[in-house]
Amino acid sequence: MTGSIIQELKRRNVFRVAIVYIVVCWLLMQIGDVMFPALLLPEWAPTLLIAFLILGFPLVVVFAWAFELTPDGVTRTSEVPEDQSITADTGRKINYTIIAVLALAVVLLLVKDVVLPQDPVPQTIEVSDHSIAVLPFKNQSAGAENAEFFAGGLHDELLTLLSRLGELRVISRTSVERLDGELTIPQIGNLLGVATVLEGQVQRAGNRLRINVQLIDTEAEGHIWANTYDRELTAENVFDLQSDIARTIADALHAEISPAGEELLDAVPTRNTEALEQYLLGVQHWHRHSFGSLQSAIAYLTRATELDPQYAEAWVALASAYTSAYQTGAMTRNEYVRSTEKAVRKALDLNPRLGPAHAQQALLQWALGDLSGAEASFLQALELDPHDSTTIGEYAYFLRGELRPEEAIPLLEKQLVDDPLSTELLFQLGKAEMHAGRPERFVEIARRIREIDPSTVHGYTGAMQAYLWMGRLDLGVEWFARSLAIDPLDYENWAHAALTNEQLGAHEVADRYMRRAEEIGPGRPSVLKCKALIHLNRDENEAALNIARYALSNNLDDRWGSDLTFLRIVRDAALDTGDVQEVIGLYRDRAPGAFADKPEITFDIVGYAVDVILPLQYAGEDEIAQRIIDASMAWYERHNPARIYGYDTFIMDAELFALNGQEDLAIERLRNAVDSGWTMNWQAFALGRNLESLEQNPEYRNLIARLESRTNEYLDNWLSAPYVGETDLRDQSAK
């Protein structure tokens, strides 16, 4: 009986139909595996397909048993006479179908495994080193507005989260974003010194979000773990997704998550999806640090805080954008203080454990003159978030600014181990080396920056600053021009390039650069300062004075100390008229510590202290003037700022000696500066009133003649040097 049933199953081609069905099902599942992710279908779609195929199998088998294909069509098997049955012919056709389907299966396998990217196959690979580089997520969202920024924001947030978990050593964002796309996984591992790499792809379509991630061993190139996350695009889902990925990575690398890390994983910074999107876009624009991108960043982040005023991270990011705008000259000091105070206060009220919030508070305290408070805030920020490259760079900036570059250098070098391709950290290292008396190192570091990213302006402004520090105005303006070709909206660099060309004697070039600066940044303190100094250099004193009075009346100042320049111009005019009481009051308002019975001189006020001495002497206030001279000299001897801030502060020492009647010592300081190569800003000091007691000294006049000769030599070098860039910004008529 059993044998007869099997024979009948064969005769009716049930087995052949079953085989065809199974092979076709397999083909459909393989096609679905490729197409479902591309179509951004939900996670349950493959399961639904398999369920339908399983349910279809018994139906197909029953159909093959109950029905037969005849010349007249499909007929019930029981109604077909045995002598008229063509099941044998149908069976041969089914065999051909099986062969064809199997051939198609082979083709599909080849396409899937060779042509198309292979899905990661999880393997069990033991990795003892808790180090990881999270590569920038690939954006696979076709046509979605701001999709690239959104993918970058998700990558950035995941990377930041991982870096705060505890045992993991995570390569910073700036380095992984600069990796050459042609590098292999082992090459990335060797370059960054990591045992694992995380790759990811982001797809966004409407309100759906899909992220594919895979963790790869850099030595064996084997996949440690892989997964696909398919969620509705909500803020809660994004944070849950990031936490899931972070936990899985920590487990895969056997890294223990700290209690603080567990809190971060459970946190939901905002439940407003639009606020999150604005935040992600704003942070990505902030990372670019150009004038235009910073304005976009501020707009996006402001919108994020409006959508969710309780979003602490957005307030911190907004404060960071304000800081960058101030540091690049896009905001005045007063604008920066007013805007940042609100953002920092709000962030800390909402979450006092945010390390970057304390870092922004530190920078604000520094700007307000609270040095001890600033350092305490920096140290608290680093305690909460010890691996934050941005905070470390800002603290190094603070240390350098406070005449402690030797402390900044090891801090930066240590962080560069985890962020070896960070052009920002390298730039800060170059500045610290320069302020430590090694400007030639800054030239080398600037070259390294350009090798990493030829499009970043730091590689050009770094070389420019180093050469100007060394007194090489010709090379300085050459690199000024190169930097302007990289970031043509930097009105601050246009203004300072105009002033440097003026100091070289390239007056027509200076005029062209200044016109451009005024077009881009009209009324900005740095632009007004440089324009006023150009007027002074041309003996157009009234024009310079009008600018200075306007700036002071409107309380204009910036990070370059424009206020000090404006005040000096007004001071010198007052010295000519003898009406110095009002200007003395202006200095008293800015540096009250200098007027104490025991003057308190700090780096922030030493410039004001030196400049008020002459008005006090004119006013007959010799006792106060002498106290300030003695205190300023003691401060100078204690800190030796010339070593840190170059020849300009070296000349300040000469000014103090001249104001104190010690002419020989003043000449000695000037001679040392000239012999060492000083050229930058010499006209300003020669024209300045603090050295007026030396004007009849033959040695002083000889030093001025040497400076004029050197400047003329540099002018010839500049005008004959080949310009490197797309546009020749020099005035060709000057050749």
Image (cartoon, rainbow, N blue to C red):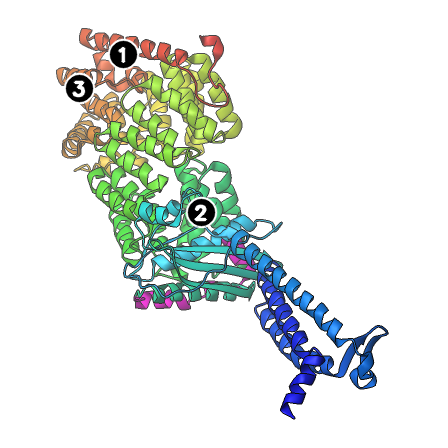
In the displayed structure, 173 sits above or below 109; it is above
The range drawn in magenta is 256-280
| Amino acid at dot 2 | Ser
- Magenta span has 340? no
Note whether residue 586 is visible.
no
Q: Which residue is mark 1?
A: 707
81 relative to 482 in the view: left or right: right
Residue type at mark 1? Leu
Residue that appears at 82% across and 79% down:
84
Q: Tag 2: Cα neighbours inside 10 Å, few (<14), some, or many (≥20)?
A: some
Identify the element where label 1 is drawn. Answer: helix
Q: Residue 583 falls in which quadrant of the image?
A: top left
Q: For residue 263: magenta?
A: yes
Q: Nearer the viewer, mark 1 or mark 3?
A: 1
Q: Is residue 220 left or right of residue 234?
A: left
Residue carrying label 3:
669
Q: Earlier in the sequence, mark 1 or mark 2?
A: 2
Which of pointers 3 and 2 lies earlier in the amino acid sequence?
A: 2
